[in-house]
Each structure stands twice: as C-alpha cells, then as structure tokens.
Image (tube, rainbow, N blue to C red):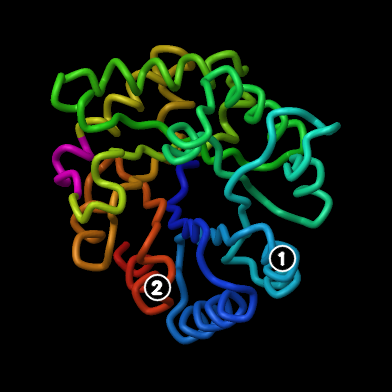
Amino acid sequence: MRRKIVAGNWKMNKDFESGIDLIEDIVELLDENPAGEVNVVLAPPYTHLQSAVEMLIDNKDISVSAQNCHHEKGGAYTGEISVEMLNSIGVDAVIIGHSERREYFAETNEQLAKKVNLALEQEMIPIFCCGEVLDERKANKHFEVVEKQIKESLFHLSAEQFDNVVIAYEPVWAIGTGETASPEQAQEIHAFIRTTVEKQYGAEVANDLSILYGGSCKPSNSKELFAKPDVDGGLIGGAALNAQDFVAIIHSF
C-alpha cells in the first residue's frame, strides 16, 4: 500500500541539545494535531540517533532514519557507520544516495546498490535519492539521468525486496537555492519514475511505491505539490529544522 511520508533530513545541523528540543517540539505539536495517515520520519545526525530512537520508542507515528551508511558491512573504515550498527540501536530507515553524498563524496550507483542491499538485509527502509543537476535539466537529460540512477542501484532487487524501498526525487538545482520545481514538473518526473518501475516490476509494485519530492519543499508550496497524484510526500531539508514549518508540511495532506 502506497504510504504518505514526510521525512525531515537535518543534514549537518543542530547540536545535541537543540536537536533534542526540536524532537520534543515536533512531538508536542503532533500530539496537539496528529499526523493522521502520514508517516513521519526524522533523520537527525548520528549523534542524535540513539536518543531519538529512545524518545520515540512508543510513538507509532514517527520513525527514525539515518542520513547515510557505509557500503561495506564492517571493517577498517575509520569514521564510518555500518547499517548493522544503525540497526542495533533501532534505526528504522536510512537515506541512500542523497545528491550531496553523490557530489561531495563521489558516491557511485554501484556503491549505492551495495548500501541498498545492506539496508534491506537488516530490514531497514532505504530512502533512495535520485535527481539531476541544472546542466542536465537544461540539456533535457533529466529523464535519462534519473532512469540510469534507478536502474543501476535498484533494479537488481527482486519485486519483494523493491516493495520495501522508498524513492525520493531531488531536482538538485532546487536544493538550498530557493528554487523549486513547479508542481507540474514534479508530477511529470514522479510519473516517469513510477512508469519506469512499472516496466521492471509491474503495475502493482509501481502503484505501491512511495515517491517523495525533495527540492525546497516548504509550507508555502507543499500542499500544491502533495496534491499531485504521483507525489507521495517530501524529503524536507531546511524546513525540517523548524518544528512549526515541518509540522505544517505534514498537515499539507
């Protein structure tokens, strides 16, 4: 069944104390005005993960995601975090292939496929990111780029495995720039992603897939974006750092 999801990616923001305050504020606001059928996901930095899991252990509406994991099970990788480590503290999901990871850390589709495999082995939800940069959009190569990212990192999975994946489309040119893909542009490529998945796995799997929009989504545009038939929620960046803005986006549904 396709889920409505609003996930907050804090990136490298919030020290420990202010992060805990943010979680408490989000919980309080959602207690006052529940999320309803929307699945809420919080992706704080590594330093907050165990505390977030403990704080939300009895909360059925909010789950916890890591922002990244390593593509190997373990070993001599100083400073890295494995999926098994994340699973051991109760983390529910992990963001894989965010555009910033691709750009700043040169992550490849092959590495991301390994991360997806490891997440699924640990029964964690991979939130797989895909999307084009500005030059690719201007060259009208966005469909080609997104299709390649999905095929090379996800299409080795069985239909049963794929059913546990969430995809987040990121128009990279709209992240942190204040630019936003129009609702029509978002719908166009979300529909393309669903059609691409349908060709590989069939209509049932494609229709069950949650596809999130991840490009400068905020309270002022989230309702219009989420009204599109193939936009199932958002992977929220800056607005996720403000409890009222984040909860307003959740209530856009």
Amino acid type indicated by mark 2: Val
Question: Along the polypeptide, which appears first: circle 2 or circle 1?
Answer: 1
Task: Answer few, some or many: residues within 10 Å of disc 2's Cα (few below 14, many 20 plus, some between 14 and 19).
Answer: many
Residue 167 appears at what percent x and percent y?
A: 45, 36
* Chain part drawn in magenta: 180-187
Residue 185 shown in magenta: yes
Amino acid type indicated by mark 1: Val
Which residue sits at x=40%, y=75%?
Answer: 242
Query: Which mark, residue 53?
Result: 1
Task: Answer few, some or many: residues within 10 Å of disc 1's Cα (few below 14, many 20 plus, some between 14 and 19).
Answer: many
Residue 139 appears at what percent x and percent y?
A: 15, 19
Secondary structure beneath label 1: helix
Residue at label 2?
247
187 sits to left or right of 5: left
Residue 118 appears at what percent x and percent y?
A: 72, 30
In this rendering, the answer to whether 96 lies above or below 239 is above
Which residue sits at x=57%, y=66%?
Answer: 61
In this rendering, the answer to whether 79 lies above or below 196 is below
- Of 190 and 238, nearer the camera is 238
Q: Residue 55: which quarter of the image?
A: bottom right
